[in-house]
Image: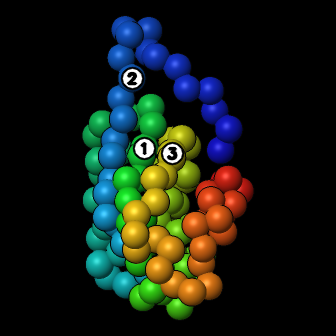
Amino acid sequence: MRKTLRFREDGTFTIVQFTDTEFCEPDDEELRMKDMMRRIIEAEQPDLVVYTGDVIASNKSPNPAAAFRDAVSVPEQMGIPWAAVFGNHDSEAPDMTREQLHALQLSH
């Protein structure tokens, strides 16, 4: 998503931070996490969502790229810009390097 970030007219800029979401494969826990994320974003109306570390648990996921896309799907669907900082669990799978994750992130 390409969107210019700006301060609001009142001079504020709101960031919502999610950390250690560790998405790996769709299940009830991840559905609850996405619902919680949606409710927080609706309540806070942020200008930016930031994921700080362990967006996915790549070594537990059969498809780390799909897990990453699922993890960031809530702000994307809501039209909120997001950014991610990777943690140690994001690139533990042998078939998902940080470079690949970064390229995936940039493709959004």
Amino acid carrying label 1: it is: Val
- Label 3 CA crowd tier, 10 Å (few <14, some 14–19, many 20+): many
Q: Quadrant of residue 2?
A: top right
The residue located at (28%, 40%) in the rendering is 43
Amino acid carrying label 2: it is: Phe
- Label 2 CA crowd tier, 10 Å (few <14, some 14–19, many 20+): few
Residue 38 visible in the picture: no
Residue 77 visible in the picture: yes
Q: Is tag 1's residue or tag 2's residue first in the polypeptide sequence?
A: 2
Question: Label 2: which residue?
Answer: 13
- Taking the view exactly as shown, the residue that stands out farthest to the top is 10
Answer above or below: position of 34 versus 78. below
Q: In the image, residue 23 lies at what x, y percent?
A: 41, 74
Q: Are marks 3 and 1 in contact (CB under 8 Å)?
A: yes
Element type at mark 2: loop
The residue located at (62%, 85%) in the rendering is 95
Question: On residue 49, which mark appears?
Answer: 1
The residue located at (55%, 52%) in the rendering is 76
Question: On residue 82, which mark appears?
Answer: 3
